Amino acid sequence: MASSGSIFTNKEIRDAEESLSKLQKKQKRLAARIDEACGKLVDTKFDRGLMDELEELEKEEVDIGTKQLELTRSWVLLRRELRREVLVEKKRQLKSDAELPNPTSISKMEMRLFGHTSTKRTLVSELDHDLSTWELDSGEITILKDKLGKGTFGSVVKGKLRGKPVAVKTIETNWKVNGEVNAKILDGFRNECAVMTKLLHPNVLLLMGVCIEPDEGKLIMVTELMPRGSVFDLLHKGSEPISFKQRMRFARDTALGVNWLHLSTPQILHLDLKTQNILVDENWVAKVADFGLSRIKKRDIKGAVGSPLYMAPEVLAEQPYDEKADVFSFGIILCELVSCKIPYEDKDFESVSDVFRFVVKNQKRPTLPLDCPQRLVRLINQCWDPDPKKRPSFKTIVESQVLDEVMLDSIISEANAPARAFWLRSFKTNEGNVLDHVPWKVFAKAFIKHCNVNLPKKTKWSDALEMKALQMALVPNAESIKTGAVSLEEFGRSLEWFGPFTPDERFIKNVVDTIHINGFFGDITSENAERQMAGKQVGTYMLRFSSKPGCYTVTVMEADNQLKHYRIKHRAGKGYSIGSHDYVSLPELVKARKNDLGLKRFLGGSKYAQLFVAHESQVDGTYAVIAPKGH
């Protein structure tokens, strides 16, 4: 009976082993295809079609993995059955129970490994550290001398992989003691790699491959190269200041990356979110990096992890925490981005105990600058609230577009608030991100629709004088009506000169009226203005934009070849003034002050004047050129 059962069981085991072998070969071939697909994705800058293809391959990989688990489980159960038969036979031979293993303990072990049923689990509690599909031959990696920085487990240097510039992280710490591998460091390294294999997002650092050969002293992770370094270095060590708009871009990119982690299945917590771990590529896109401390979300996670200055109170206090710990860290990052100061740099903390006392016991936070936008103040206060339940999720932060609104607030003044709503609603990527630049053609069509611009009949929008004038104001360097792009900054500046922005034709009419003023040179620099005016007769003048958006400058030639500059003060929606005199429009001011400013003859030859001359030569009798009175 036992003998026949053993023969049967042995055959079942051999069949299972054969099936497993075939499955592993198929898995290896699929892994090569996935590697190839990942390489194509990087080369094509994440083409959507290739991403869909990669997702299909990954689904197939998951199916194979599931089948492998089922086969492995069957194989283990068959091995157990065979082992039980052998044990029973041994018991018979020895006629004693003394040396028999406890069947109950074996049963408990099986229960712990596989559960009571064969139902597939959709959520796991630990990361899968199988990195076989990402393994590289160390000979493929060329390490260069350029040092890029230090990560959680070692140094990061520039390198090359299959001809592509990459970042290479290698272990430098004592990961071997007396010839034995330091399991904690090795597991942490594997954990970081394992997290990255689960993630594919434009704002998460891309893993290219790993080389894990601890016996030969090789623990290497290869990622995409981020040539601009970390946000921390750009903020605190860079030679040039980072604009507020770009800092808010960093914040939004970070929120998008961490939101991807938190919405993954299973959910991944970063737990070491700080500006040192936010890297910037050549296009100024920020990506979340350094996942050495990341964990799968489990119930009642405890223990202090991360960097104390960015730690949530519950983490510092070693209380249970969840994904809202990352939200707290993001609040500290936002404060750092708006202030350009290292968190708590004015507090002289000497130990973690000092941070604990300040943050946990006294519930205090870093000092926000007085000029911090109110939208941002509210968001930061919510993010670092002592109660994790009151902190917003990253999903809420991203979907609310609050960071885009903060950026728009800094570029477009309150007087032109409707223009913020127009840009926010009209110009987004497919992912919902607000664009920095918009092709002129796209902007023009959206503007015409939003402001109800009434163009002449039988006239293409690109031929209309109003639209040509608007393009000259918004895209000063465009070669033709169909080229160039409207930048958010240029739009904001133009709003100050020609605003207020309203959902009607007032804005575009003010553009036409202003640039049609005789002697208007617009965006010419002061140096070029002086060159243009050199040697001109007394009383020759020009009108141009001042260096301060919204204001204008009248430059007039006086005696002895001396130039005199008069500043015209103006704010969007307000009047125009020189001294104590206010005027409703700029043409009215020029007309009224001609005599006392000594304006005798305007300087000709501006590109704006040429626009009207060229247009008048093209229009027929059905089109009346817009020309303000009083010129």
Image (spheres, rainbow, N blue to C red):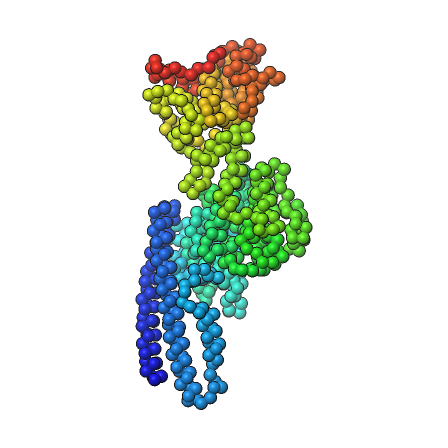
Give residue 427's quadrant in the image: top left
Q: Residue at horizontal 57%, vertical 48%?
A: 391
Whether residue 329 appears in this view of the structure is no
316 left or right, relative to 473: right
Q: Residue at horizontal 36%, vertical 83%?
A: 2
Q: From this view, report whether residue 335 is shown above or below residue 29.
A: above
500 left or right, relative to 140: right
Q: Residue at horizontal 68%, vertical 50%?
A: 362
- Quadrant location, the N terminus: bottom left
Q: Nearer the viewer, residue 355 or 160?
A: 355
Where is residue 115? Give x, y as percent. 45, 68
Q: From this view, report whether residue 499 is shown above or below residue 407.
A: above
Q: Residue at horizontal 48%, vertical 46%?
A: 256
Where is residue 189? Give x, y as percent. 49, 60
Q: Nearer the viewer, residue 383 or 496?
A: 383
Q: Nearer the viewer, residue 439 or 219?
A: 439
Whether residue 60 appears in this view of the structure is yes
Q: How many marks?
A: 0
Q: From this view, report whether residue 79 is shown above or below residue 189.
A: below
Where is residue 230? Give x, y as percent. 52, 47
Where is residue 372? Give x, y as percent. 59, 38
Q: Nearer the viewer, residue 46 or 420?
A: 420
Q: From this view, report whether residue 492 is shown above or below residue 267.
A: above
